[in-house]
Image (cartoon, coloured by chain):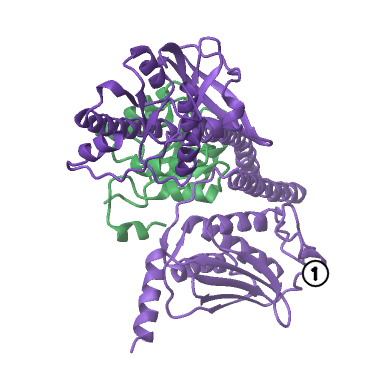
Chain colours: A green, B purple
Amino acid sequence: MRNRTAVRKILVVEDERDLADPLVLRLNADGRFAAEAAYDGREGLRRALATPPDAALIDLDLPELDGWSLCRRLYENPHTRGTRVVVMTAWAGRDLLRRALAEGVAKILLKPFEEQEMLDALAGEPAAAEPASARREEP
Amino acid sequence: MISCFIDKACGGSLKYVVEHVSRLAEGLSLLERGEHDIVLLDLHLPDSRGMETLDKVRAKSPGIPVVVLTNDDQEEVGLDTIARGAQDFIGKGRIDPIRLRRAISFALERERLSRQMESVVEGSPDGMIVVDPGGVVRYANQAALALLGRPREQVLGSAFAFEAAPGKTTSHALSPAPGRELCVEMRVSEIDWKGAPARLAALRDVTETRKVEELRAEVRERLRVDQLKDQLLNTVAHELRSPLSVVKAIVATMHDGLSGPLNDDQAQFTATAMKHINRLTRLLNNFLDLARLESRSARVSRRPVDALGLIREVSEGIRLANRGRPIVFLYDLPASAPLVQVDADMIAQVLGNLLDNAMRYARARVLVRAACAEDAVEVSVVDDGPGIPPDKFADLFNKFVQLDRPRGGSGYKGTGLGLAISREIVTLNGGRISAENASGRGACFRFTLPLAAAARLQEVAHAKSNGGP
């Protein structure tokens, strides 16, 4: 069991700095998270492998390494398999939702999204399946 | 003497009834009765001589085989009679019962075969036209006449309108009647016609096939345009969402004091900005929804759905979101309802829209009602607000129509697209949507959800078992 009182490490991967920075600010202000940003897919992967985060907030349109590929690389690597992956995108569509579920994504956020929605999504349990009861105990 | 031979000749298995006349005029009047199978014809009669005799008989009864009895054994006379349509000839000097019988049998059989061949060509669904080397039409079957829209006597002997080049397939436009346009495909082959080279033009009506092909091309083109439109919509959506998300994240950060404390004015301004950013987001989402619905590029995935479960889930969500408001939520739902065949996400959006509206206009109460009809479940959302002004009914479900907002509202402003979206969705799901003023006060919005096929069958079975003895 994870210690629920511990601060969760969050990696935000978003090439739009204007969005990434206020999101990181919001996450760090919340108290439950310690967030940092990477501004392209390759950098995101490098940081994630160097220090596996508890959760990653990943934009799907990324330079260098696109969001889907990054999700897959995180899932395929034993060090980051347990990272809870939340994706954000400005592309709406049911196909997207289906693919996200197939890729093991915990939550998909359609831009512009509510901050609370993002906080809830990242506060959820990591990707490794845990009993539903454990999930319900989340703050 | 001939009669005598015929009597002898007819002694075999073939049965004949013979009528004998000695003048052509008598013969022709007998032929009028149409009872004869064959004519044995002497060319030299008291009232007619030579080939003329044969021509007259052929003209009178073109379908009856003729065996000519020639005065002598002259081959050329005999062959001439064949060329003029006689089936056979026998020299009188060489006549005997066996020959005569054989000649009659052969003539009958030849006539039968030639009629059979003719009927094959004549009855062909494709037009068949024989054109001589001079370009003159020598033969045209029924189908050809129908395609040309002209009677046989006009077509035969006239010049053929199209260049008949063997081995090529060509397309032609024909108009057999005013206002009737046909597209005809022509193939030409070389044949022998009455001993001379000629061309056979086969004409096939491909009007319908072409129409189908054109229709297919049109459908392909429309799909392509729809895809382009869809792509454009997605791109526009993406381009609008990205900057909007940045603005929202930054203003929210400021508004929540994450970038430093705000004075009262600043707090008020950022709150107003947030309200409008949220409105812009709703407007964008609604606008894109509606564009997708109207262009029919929205994917509708209709499955059997538990209507009551869906209604409870959506209504509870809205009720919880409005917990702070002094509005009572009432349900009037049947204990059970058959499955409906709808796209659950889309219908949830409709019910959400209607409930949102009701919450905005209601004074004290919102009622969600469901009832089972013969082929659908009918859902109503009723509020106790001011109701719909009579002059607004006509375009209530049109785009950007908003009723006067209730006084003292929460400041939530609609997009004017909710009802238009709802109507599109309900229609796409095979239902109907309508609005009326509730008895007493308030508005009532109603929509139907068609029953799933399985549920319909069950209903039928149920009705039968109930109605049975």
Given residues B57 and B201, the one toward you in this image is B57
Residue B425 locus on image (x, y percent): 57, 55
Q: Work out whether residue B91 can be spotted.
A: no
Q: Quadrant of residue B38?
A: top left
Q: Mark 1 lies on which chain?
A: B
Which residue is identified by label 1? B389
Please indicate whether residue B48 sits to the left or right of residue B83 in the image.
Answer: right
Q: Is mark 1 on a helix, strand or loop?
A: loop
Q: In which quarter of the image is residue B101?
A: top left
Given residues B251 and B427, the one toward you in this image is B427
Q: Is residue B405 above or below residue B372?
A: above
Residue B453 locus on image (x, y percent): 40, 64
Q: In this view, does A64 lie above or below A83?
A: above
**Residue at the location (61% across, 71% down)?**
B381
Q: Quadrant of the N terminus of chain B?
A: top left
Please indicate whether residue B209 sits to the left or right of residue B78 in the image.
Answer: right
- Seen as rendered, the residue at the extreme bottom is B469
Residue A71 locus on image (x, y percent): 36, 34
**Residue at the location (45% across, 56% down)?**
B302
What's the amino acid at mark 1? Pro
Give the number of marks. 1
Q: Work out whether residue B364 can be spotted.
A: yes
Q: In which quarter of the image is the C terminus of chain B?
A: bottom left
Q: In this view, does A39 lie above or below B190?
A: below
Residue B107 locus on image (x, y percent): 31, 31
Please indicate whether residue B184 sits to the left or right of residue B167 in the image.
Answer: right
Given residues B141 and A38, the one toward you in this image is B141
